[in-house]
Every structure is written in structure tokens, then in C-alpha cells.
Amino acid sequence: MINEQQVREILGKLEDPFLHKTLEQTNGVLNVSIKEEKQHVSVKIAIAKTNTPEQMQLQMKVVEVLKEAGASTVGIRFEELTTEVLESFRGKATASEAHDILSPLSTVQVIAIASGKGGVGKSTVSVNLAVALARLGKKVGLIDADIYGFSVPDMMGIQEMPVVKEDRIYPVDRLGVKVISMGFFVENNAPIVWRGPMLGKVLDQFFRDVEWGDLDYLLLDLPPGTGDVALDIHQALPTSKEIIVTTPHPTAAFVAARAGAMALQTNHDILGVIENMSWFESKVTGEKEYVFGKGGGPKLADELRTELLGQVPLGQPDWTKEDFAPSVYDTEHSTGKIYLEIAKSVVNQLEK
Ligand SMILES: Nc1ncnc2c1ncn2[C@@H]1O[C@H](COP(=O)(O)OP(=O)(O)OP(=O)(O)O)[C@@H](O)[C@H]1O
């Protein structure tokens, strides 16, 4: 006859597959009930990440050890450890756990930048937000995961290629940002014909095999839209904060709302909305003209119950600079200042 005490002792020795701590240390055995006459054991277990292959393996192990101890049948329910418990372990994480982007103990904030459709300036926003965060002294990485329109290397004026050494990929350092782009791995600007699952694997490799070092923020420029490639990528991401980029026309915001809905459906949090191409300011009169309409950003933020992180006007960076990065605004440029303010609100929200 197996009893509750024995079940707790046996399960307490198994490890949480993500935290590499025993379930006794994580207080992961939440509930045990035994139907004595039939020796049916039901348990509720909390681990760092549910619905994963690791959960399946642990599930098989639990059944095995409980049956060995005399249970005739075993019922298991899993749930995720609370944020407070994870936070407490994060505080004690080793450097390698803290830097491992896919670990629940990672201290790297992953920010994915999405849009409902192409051409709204998602890549421009990703690049400038990454540079602005670096200008605030943050350690920043940027993954250009936009397979259709990988444009980050050109936008940042990157000439070099990442170095690959002993199976590790060393990102290109540009303007204080560590950059990896799909474009680095495609010859002669050839179009990519992979499907989503393949892309998910490449992204996973970027998380595991790129030598990111010690990052505060990892930004991802996602493919535009809400089709299956975007969905596959969302599912392949570790839990992230998402920024949705839209132009100011109400119909554009309507399309962008679908990108927000996709983020929520795939268990990511929405950090805020950035409205791009908000107005054009006449250099002659200083008057603002709302050439692409008005109100889309605030409307979208309202709809997604999130913050409008900023509005970015139409206009090009200063192209007379020697160190040429065609899409990066300087710190003194009025748009460069707007990006710094956006970066500050991101930091305020995430480092509260
Ligand atoms: N605020 C702006 N003012 C002027 N031009 C802009 C602005 N934002 C973006 N652009 C220009 O608009 C074009 C599209 O921008 P970008 O490539 O960033 O969009 P995207 O949403 O990433 O597109 P896709 O997803 O299709 O790659 C680029 O030529 C870019 O330089």
C-alpha cells in the first residue's frame, strides 16, 4: 500500500527539467490523492514550462516511479510555477542560466516587433529601438527574423559577416548592438523559400548557437502579417514582450489589431504600440500634415489595452554622416530623440 508521504518523497527527488532543481526544492508537488482500494494515485505537479517535450519526459518518469512503488494507475496534471517562485530562482541563477535565452531563469528580456502587414516600418523601428536602448547603456542584441524582407544589415550599414568558430556564431557588433540576420546566411539576396517550421528551427538555433554574451535585451524583427509563417515564429519564440507597429490610418490599425491578437493567442504579452509615419512636418512652415491619416496608434493601443509608446514622424536620417547607417537616426535628430524616449518607456516598463 503506497501512501501520500511516500508519493511526496519519491516525486520530491525528481528534477524540474528547466530549473534543474528537485521538485522538493521547487515545492513542485502541489497535490497528491490516493484511492486506496484501487491504488490509483493522482498528482498535481508544477514545473517552469508546461506543454513542452520536457514535460512529456517528466510525465513518463512520474508514471514509472510511482508504478514501481506500487501504484496501479497514475493520473497527472501539470501547471506552471508562479511568477514569484520563478523570480526567486532567477535571483539565484548562475551566469550561464541567466544568459541562456531559452531558460526560464534567463534574465534577458526578449522583445518581438510585429506588424499586421508589410511596409509599415517594423524593421526601421526595430533597428532604431535597438540602437536607442544601446545608447541608454543597455546590452542589446537584434535578430532580423523577417525572412521576406531581411533588411537590417543594409539599414544599419553592416559590411561584415558574423564569424562562425567551433559551432558558435559570433554576431556582428554595430552601433553597440549585436546583430544576427537571416540575410547573413542567404547568398546574393536570394529569396527564402522555407516554410514556418523550418524557420522556427533556425530561430531556435539563433537562440542556442549564437554567442550573445551578457544581454539585457534581445529584439526580434518578426515577419509581417498574421499568416502561418508569422504564427509558426510566434510559437517558436520564448515568452516575449511584443511591440506592434502600425501607421496612423484607422484601417491600418484594424489590421495591426490582428497581430496583437496573435501575440496574445501565442502567450506573449503586449508591451505597447508604436505609430510610425505619423505626420510630415514642413521644414518651411513647421506645420504638421497628417498624410497617412490620424488616430490609428492611439486607437490600436486602446483596443489592445496597452500603452502608445510613441509616434514617429515621416523623415529620413542625416545622410551626410561618415559612418553610414542609412536608416539610423542620430541622437541629435528630432526622430532620434523620439526613439530615445520610446526606449526609456520600454526600460521603465520592464525594469520596474
Ligand atoms: N518614419 C519614416 N519616415 C520615412 N520613411 C520611413 C519611415 N519608416 C519607415 N520608412 C521607410 O519605409 C520603408 C518600409 O520600412 P521598413 O522596411 O522598416 O518596413 P517593414 O514594416 O519592416 O516592411 P517589411 O515587413 O515588408 O519588411 C523603408 O523604405 C523605410 O526606409
Image: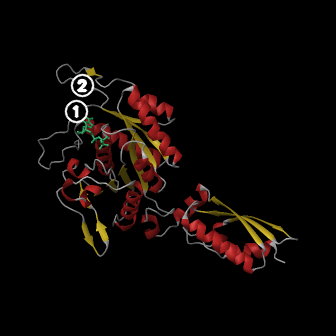
Query: Please, which residue is most extreme toward the right here?
Result: 37
**Rendering coords of residue 336 (x, y %):** 26, 39
Q: Amino acid at mark 2?
A: Glu
Counting from the top left corner in percent of width and height, residue 259 is at: 44, 40
Which image quadrant is residue 334 in? top left
Q: Residue at x 26, y 61 (%)?
A: 185
Residue at x-position 74% and y-position 77%:
67
Judging depth in this view, the residue of 158 and 287 nearest the camera is 158
Mark 1: give few (<14), some (14-19) or many (20+) Cα within 10 Å. few
Based on the displayed image, in which of its 4 quarters is residue 117 positioned? top left
Residue type at mark 1 is: Gly
Q: Secondary structure at mark 1?
A: loop
- Image quadrant of ligand 1 equals top left
Q: Which residue is mark 1?
A: 315
Residue assigned mark 2: 281
Looking at the rendered structure, the secondary structure element under dot 2 is strand
Q: Residue at x 15, y 48 (%)?
A: 324
> Taking the image as drawn, is residue 185 in sight?
yes
Mark 2 burial class by Cα count in 10 Å: few <14, some 14-19, many 20+: some
Image height check: is 265 above or below 66?
Answer: above
Q: Residue furthest bottom?
A: 68
Q: Is residue 46 above or below residue 167?
A: above
* Horizontal relation, residue 98 to residue 78: left or right: left
Quarter holding the N terminus is bottom right
Marks 1 and 2: in contact by CB < 8 Å?
yes
Label 1 C-beta lies within 8 Å of the nearest ligand 1 atom: yes
Question: Seen in the image, is 303 located left or right of residue 62?
Answer: left
Residue 95 vs residue 126: left or right? right
Whether the residue carrying mark 2 lies under 8 Å from ligand 1 is answered with: no
Q: At which x and y percent is residue 78? A: 65, 61
